[in-house]
Image (cartoon, rainbow, N blue to C red):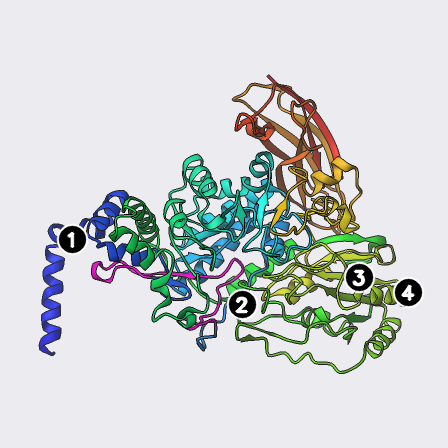
């Protein structure tokens, strides 16, 4: 044993023997966190504090090595743990052990309407992040679905603030049980990709508080989120990443947030605003890193040397700096310096199967005329699968949520595997959309190039369709630019690559056609009356093909419900009806609180498929809808009960939805608003009673004059239904 090793061992023994006497307060995890924070802060130099509040690489920020305070490591994203990139470049680091499980997109998770699956999702994703030693997960995203053209809608949880809030809370809690902070994004009003860095959002306070903030408030106050990411856009003329009203007045003062505010990459634009307006950590200001032109671009971030010079000159003090570091230290003690956090696990079969379960429950059966689904082996021996999305990998691309997946089962492979020897499966491409398969150096490995003309592809598809007993057309969108992808918005509601014309032609060739829409957005369906079965498939991750096959063949009974409205035409959407999307240097939310189904009901516009809609392979009967009291006081609750019976021949699940209607209000209110839901699982013939409790908060609206929530005394209707349009019954109550 060398002298150095012997010396080190003696020092360690001495340290352990005197641990109680010599351990610094900030390292003693038996002490209260706030005391540890103040002790650590008192030991740090101004230069060390400045270093902590900005990046040192693409995805990390420094700790204080001298004090044993570790670095912070961030990772995209909300659907899986991003592969490693080089220290200061977007190019791949070339690791061979960073291929993750790709989970379904958050549109799919929210469409399960299942809080337990949100917990499972967060637990699984948190374990993957923890294993890769990431202490901040950049997600989930909960911006509201305002327009079906928003390129990032697939990363979010739909158009309803109550639903998004209910689904995000268990996700956050489960992620953070792994000692990994959920960084909820993008705060706030990030509802488009067009001019996202410069557009100034003009929205009234009622819409801000009733539509665009509630899910974030739930994330903070109910979910206990440890981090929030600022948005790219402006609000009140100030960038959201250093917006005094959003970050100081609302997030900190009104909601009591004690976590870290992280800038979206490239979202910081001004040193003084970043100092005083509530930002804690600056990332990605110059996304080309060291090639920006300085010897070290990170030192020239807005919250780096420019801030330090302002302190040294006396232009600003250190009060705000200390507060930022306190927030970062609090994050550190909750994550990297939490000795009891678990070790996590990565790319496991358990996680893949969790993703498959979520995918199966998130798939939405939109239409099933004449019970064409599930596929019947007695009737449908020869299956034609048509469409590029049957074979195209969807885990690669789409922006920051792009993943290097351990594997991805395509819909075609899932169908073939499930079909086995009982069916004959024939495939035709039908159309060529995007043959590429790489993003930031992650390559799918697929060669989708096809030199045939559109006419040749169509002819092949029609021949295959005519010869089949049933056709599954697997199309929709993909994660290419100008589709479901970060950075740009879609140009229209129609399907790309000539799919609408092709679907119509195939429907004439074979009336037994199923359309499976792979997308994170609503699409127009001008051929809807020609197609008897329509399924919303989402981006479903690693186990996509197996989950899709399970539903199509009836191994899994679909139970997903839409979390946003499918309009018939773009003009039926509120933002587009008012020509208020995407705007120019500013965008005005002229529709105010009337977004999504609220707009359709206010204007009496029939949707293609309504919010909350989703069919099953069985049927359900609602009965005996009642409230436990006819009137309630301001501090009381009311419980609505309904009996739900499975009247079909197979097990299934139904989402019972509770909407509130204010029968007389001082201010305009929606026809009804979702304020409760529960998912009930029933065997064939089984009946259960579902109960949902609401309180004064669920009856309230935001009074912008009083800047407060108001629940006016008077009559309300509580409506119970299977969707926003399929109301099964209602009861009246009075708020005293």
Give neighbour class at mark 4: few <14, some 14-19, many 20+ (Cα, 10 Å): some
- Image spot of residue 141 (x, y percent): 54, 52
Using the numbered discs, state the Cα–Cα distance from disc 4 to disc 2 in whole angstroms.
38 Å
Using the numbered discs, state the Cα–Cα distance from disc 3 to disc 1 in whole angstroms.
67 Å
What residue is pinned by disc 1?
Answer: 23
What residue is pinned by disc 2?
Answer: 403
Using the numbered discs, state the Cα–Cα distance from disc 3 to disc 4 in whole angstroms.
13 Å
Q: Earlier in the sequence, mark 1 or mark 4?
A: 1
Q: Nearer the viewer, residue 354 or 222?
A: 222
Give neighbour class at mark 3: few <14, some 14-19, many 20+ (Cα, 10 Å): many
Residue 337 visible at all: no
Tell whether 72 sits left or right of 243: left
Q: Earlier in the sequence, mark 2 or mark 1?
A: 1
What residue is pinned by disc 4?
Answer: 508
Q: Earlier in the sequence, mark 2 or mark 3?
A: 2
Give neighbour class at mark 1: few <14, some 14-19, many 20+ (Cα, 10 Å): few
SS at circle 1: loop
Magenta region = 62-90
Q: Magenta stretch: residue 516 in it? A: no
Mark 2 touches mark 3? (CB < 8 Å): no
């Amino acid at each position: 044993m060398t002298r150095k090793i012997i010396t080190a061992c003696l020092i360690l023994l001495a340290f352990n023997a005197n641990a109680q006497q010599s351990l610094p307060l900030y390292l003693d995890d038996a002490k209260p966190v706030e005391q540890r924070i103040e002790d650590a802060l008192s030991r740090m130099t101004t230069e060390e504090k400045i270093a902590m509040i900005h990046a040192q690489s693409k995805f990390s920020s420094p700790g204080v090595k001298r004090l044993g305070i570790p670095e912070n490591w961030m990772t995209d994203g909300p659907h899986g743990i991003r592969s490693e990139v080089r220290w200061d470049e977007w190019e791949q680091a070339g690791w061979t052990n960073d291929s993750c499980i790709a989970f379904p997109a958050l549109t799919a998770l929210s469409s399960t309407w299942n809080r337990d699956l949100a917990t499972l999702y967060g637990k699984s994703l948190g374990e993957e992040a923890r294993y890769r030693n990431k202490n901040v997960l950049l997600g989930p995203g909960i911006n509201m679905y305002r327009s079906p053209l928003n390129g990032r809608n697939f990363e979010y949880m739909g158009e309803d603030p109550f639903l998004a809030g209910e689904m995000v809370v268990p996700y956050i809690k489960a992620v953070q049980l792994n000692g990994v902070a959920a960084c909820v994004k993008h705060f706030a009003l990030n509802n488009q990709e067009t001019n996202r860095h410069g557009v100034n959002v003009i929205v009234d306070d009622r819409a801000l508080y009733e539509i665009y903030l509630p899910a974030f408030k739930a994330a903070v106050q109910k979910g206990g989120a440890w981090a929030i990411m600022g948005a790219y856009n402006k609000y009140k003329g100030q960038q959201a990443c250093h917006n005094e009203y959003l970050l100081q007045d609302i997030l900190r003062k009104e909601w009591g947030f004690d976590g870290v505010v992280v800038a979206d990459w490239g979202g910081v634009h001004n040193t003084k605003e970043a100092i005083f307006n509530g930002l804690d950590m600056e990332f990605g200001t110059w996304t080309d890193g060291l090639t920006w032109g300085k010897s070290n671009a990170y030192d020239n971030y807005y919250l780096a040397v420019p801030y330090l010079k302002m302190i040294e000159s006396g232009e600003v003090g250190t009060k705000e700096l200390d507060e930022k570091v306190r927030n970062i230290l609090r994050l550190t003690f909750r994550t990297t310096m939490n000795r009891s956090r678990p070790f996590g696990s990565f790319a496991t079969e358990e996680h893949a199967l969790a993703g498959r379960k979520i995918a199966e429950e998130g798939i939405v059966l939109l239409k099933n005329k004449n019970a064409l689904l599930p596929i019947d082996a007695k009737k449908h021996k020869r299956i034609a699968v048509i469409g590029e999305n049957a074979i195209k990998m969807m885990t690669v691309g789409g922006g920051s949520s792009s993943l290097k997946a351990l594997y991805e089962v395509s819909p075609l492979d899932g169908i073939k595997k499930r079909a086995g020897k009982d069916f004959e499966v024939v495939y035709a491409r039908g159309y060529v959309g995007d043959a590429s398969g790489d993003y930031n150096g992650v390559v799918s490995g697929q060669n989708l190039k096809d030199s045939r003309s559109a006419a040749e592809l169509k002819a092949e598809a029609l021949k295959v369709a005519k010869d089949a007993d049933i056709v599954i057309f697997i199309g929709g969108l993909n994660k290419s630019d100008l589709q479901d992808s970060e950075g740009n918005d879609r140009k229209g509601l129609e399907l790309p690559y000539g799919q609408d014309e092709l679907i119509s032609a195939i429907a004439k060739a074979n009336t037994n056609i199923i359309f499976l829409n792979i997308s994170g957005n609503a699409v127009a369906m001008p051929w809807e009356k020609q197609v008897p079965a329509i399924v919303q498939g989402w981006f479903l991750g690693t186990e996509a093909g197996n989950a899709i096959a399970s539903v199509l063949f009836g191994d899994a009974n679909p139970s997903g419900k839409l979390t946003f409205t499918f309009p018939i035409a773009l003009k039926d959407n509120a933002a587009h009806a008012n020509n208020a999307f995407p705007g120019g240097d500013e965008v005005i939310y002229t529709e105010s609180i009337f977004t999504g189904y609220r707009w359709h009901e206010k204007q009496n516009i029939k949707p293609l498929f309504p919010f909350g809609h989703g069919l099953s392979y069985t049927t359900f009967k609602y009965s005996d809808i009642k409230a436990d009291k006819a009137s309630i006081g301001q501090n009381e609750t009311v419980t609505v009960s309904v009996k739900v019976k499975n009247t079909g021949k197979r097990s299934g699940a139904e989402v019972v939805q509770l909407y509130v209607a204010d029968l007389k209000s001082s201010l305009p209110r929606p026809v009804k608003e979702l304020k409760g839901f529960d998912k009930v699982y029933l065997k064939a013939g089984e009946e259960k009673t579902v109960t949902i409790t609401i309180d004064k908060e669920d009856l309230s609206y935001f009074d912008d004059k009083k800047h407060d929530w108001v629940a006016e005394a008077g009559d309300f209707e509580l409506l119970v239904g299977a969707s926003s349009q399929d109301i099964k019954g209602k009861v009246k109550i009075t708020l005293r």
